[in-house]
Image: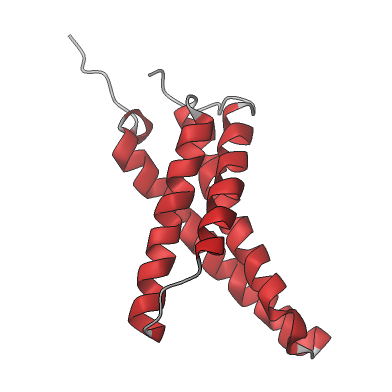
Amino acid sequence: MRKQKHSIWTNAPLSAAVAVIFGLIITGMAWMLLSAVLFYIMRDMKLIKAFAAAALTTGAYTGSFLFGKYRRRKGLFGGLLCGALMFGAVNIAGIVILGVPTDIKKLLLFTVSGAAGGVAGVNSKRPKRLMNQ
């Protein structure tokens, strides 16, 4: 009898790790893009906090959306989990680089946008190449 191939999305910790890494990559790309827009086009650093929040929100939303879209269940919990894990990664990076932990407001930002992304991912169309779970 032939062995069934299992998707990485059937394993919850592995799929959360993939979604968090994807979200962090998107966050880094959004940071670079928005900082270039802020520096070269706007030439004003007064909006740096708003642009940083937009980059964090974009990364948490897309990572949780990916988790919800391919996991296909528990979108709210998965989104909250991805947002909290991304906050932990950003917090550790802030401690290592700056020596100061990040604000608790960023946890709220990550979890709310992560929950929204997870719910939106579960309610989106099913991916064509997703293996049956």
Q: List the single residue furthest toward the top.
A: 1
Q: Position of residue 69 (x, y in %)?
A: 54, 33
Which quarter of the figure has residue 48? Answer: bottom right
Q: Residue at x 21, y 14 (%)?
A: 2
Instruction: Choose between 69 and 108: the one closer to the eye.
Output: 108
Quarter occupied by the C terminus: top left
Q: Residue at x 40, y 53 (%)?
A: 85
**In this picture, residue 58 sits left or right of residue 103:** right
Q: Residue at x 34, y 30 (%)?
A: 7
**Can residue 75 be seen from the camera position used here?**
yes
Q: Position of residue 116 (x, y in %)?
A: 62, 40
Relative to 34, is 39 above or below? below
Which quarter of the figure has residue 99? Answer: bottom left
Q: Residue at x 55, y 26 (%)?
A: 128
Q: Position of residue 101 (x, y in %)?
A: 41, 74
Instruction: Choose between 120 and 66: the one closer to the eye.
Output: 120
**Can residue 21 be seen from the camera position used here?**
no
Instruction: Choose between 46 and 126: the one closer to the eye.
Output: 46
